[in-house]
Image: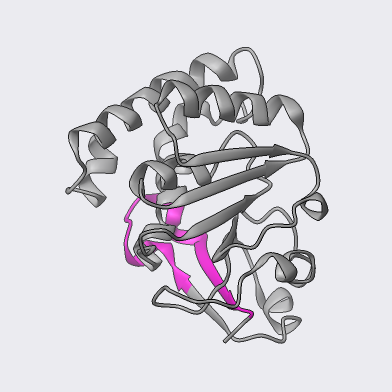
Amino acid sequence: MNRISKYFPSLTDKQRSQFETIIRLYPEWNSRINVISRKDIDNLVVNHILHSLAIAKFITFTQGSEMMDLGTGGGFPGIPLAILFPECKFHLIDRVGKKIRVAQEIAGEAGLTNVTFQHGDVGECHRQFDFVLSRGVMPLPDMVKLVRRNISRQCRNAYPNGLICLKGGDLTAELNAVKYPTIVDEISTWMDEEFFKTKRIVYVDVVG
């Protein structure tokens, strides 16, 4: 919890309690249903929760904004961001039912009321959102094609509506294949843990 407070010192007591709850619950659930690598669960706070929250260093979502979390797995980045932005809505989608179940249970026990869930394919979702979020579940060009119809043209945030991805590694080929304007920011600009030295946020403006 100290590492989260280090980067987000203005958390309310409720938010602190919610983060403490999910920090406790993920290892418990992961021992039953594997949503995080068993080798990586000890790195939950940095590699998963803080990694998700890095999006909040790139953009502060306006009250009432709605986000889709594509390929959420056990609830990342959607659940940590839903704690941080209680006046926004997050719709978490994943094809694997047991992972969605874990995310639902953890969100429920943390008292989150601004999160909804969908077990299935993104093609079955016909809603529109301000942003689609993802932890790099597929190459950027494929993701843009898949979710462009789900991104609203009515913009209300500092950046035009679009896609925000957490990515690592060499992104040259992916970025060259995307025809829309992009911004790439190094997470290490904001967070100094070793894990973030190779991690980036990639924003794709599909409506501007």
Q: Closer to the camera, 34 or 125?
A: 125
Q: Quadrant of residue 63?
A: bottom left
> Residue at the location (76% across, 72% down)?
141
Number of numbered discs overlaid on the protein picture: 0
Give the extent of the magenta segment. Answer: 185-206
Q: Closer to the camera, 140 or 153?
A: 153
Residue 162: x and y in percent read 58, 72
Residue 81: x and y in percent read 43, 47
> Residue at the location (48% across, 50% down)?
89
Residue 16: x and y in percent read 25, 33
The image quadrant where one finds the N terminus is top left
The image quadrant where one finds the C terminus is bottom right
Q: Closer to the camera, 87 or 206?
A: 87
The color scheme shown is one colour
> Left or right of 122: which side holds 106?
left
> Left or right of 203: which side holds 157?
left
> Residue at the location (51% across, 40% down)?
115
User: Is 39 drawn above or below residue 4 in the view shown?
Assistant: above
> Left or right of 206: which side holds 82?
left
Q: Is residue 187 magenta?
A: yes
Answer yes or no: is residue 39 visible.
no
Residue 170: x and y in percent read 64, 69
Q: Closer to the camera, 65 or 174?
A: 65
Q: Is residue 207 magenta?
A: no
> Residue at the location (39% across, 27% down)?
111
Answer yes or no: is residue 6 visible.
yes
